[in-house]
Image: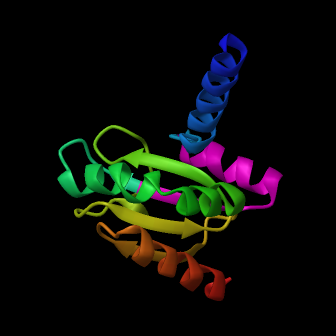
Amino acid sequence: MKTVLKYLISVVLLASALLGAELDWSHDYEAALQQAKKEKKDVYMLVTSADCRWCRKFEATTLQDESILAQLNKKYVLLHIDRDKDAMPEIFKKQRVPRHYFITSEAKIIYSFLGYWNSEDFASFLKDVDKKR
C-alpha cells in the first residue's frame, strides 16, 4: 500500500510540474533579439504595466492555457516589458496596454495588437502571425 501511495504522489507531482510549466520570459529587449537570432526564432513581446487589470487577466487566464504555452514556447523567444520600469525602444512606447508584438530577430514588427484576449482569440492571432511570416 505504501508503494502504491508513493507512486501516486510521484505521478501527481510530476503531472503538476508538467502542467504548471511556465514561460521563460526575458525582460531585456536586446538580449531577446540576440537569443532569437541564435535560436532562429521570432520574438513575442508583451508590454504591460503594474496597474493594468487587463494585463493581469491575460497573464492569469490566456497565458495559463497549455496550448498557448506550447505554441509560444515552440516558436518564440518571450519578452515581457513593463512599460513603467523596463527599457524599450521608443517605437514601442504606447499608452495602452496590454500590447502584443511579434518581432523578427532583426527587430522588424511582423504583427501587433492591443488588449486582453481569451485563449481562443489569442490562438487565432497566432495563426495570423504565421500567415504574415
* Percent x, y of residue 92: 40, 62
Residue 132: image x %, image y %? 62, 86
Nearest to the observer: residue 76 or residue 121: 121
- 95 relative position to 1: left or right: left
Residue 58 on the magenta segment: no
On screen, residue 4 above or below 125: above
Q: What kind of colouring is applied to the model shown?
A: rainbow
Q: What residue is drawn where x is 66% and y is 17%?
A: 6
Locate residue 98: give its quadrant: bottom left
Depth order, front residue of 20/130: 20
Using the rendered image of the protein, determine whether residue 41 is visible from the camera's viewpoint.
yes
Residue 51, percent from left and from top: 17, 45
Magenta stretch contains residue 44: yes
Whether residue 108 is situated above or below residue 64 in the rendered picture? below
Q: Position of residue 57 (x, y in %)?
A: 27, 54
For the point 64% across and 43% down, which residue is it?
31
Residue extending furthest toward the front: 1
Magenta span of residues: 28-46
Specify whether residue 89 is in view: no
In the picture as drawn, the residue positioned furthest to the top comes out as 2
The residue positioned 48% from the left and 57% from the top of the image is 65
Give the quadrant of the C terminus.
Answer: bottom right
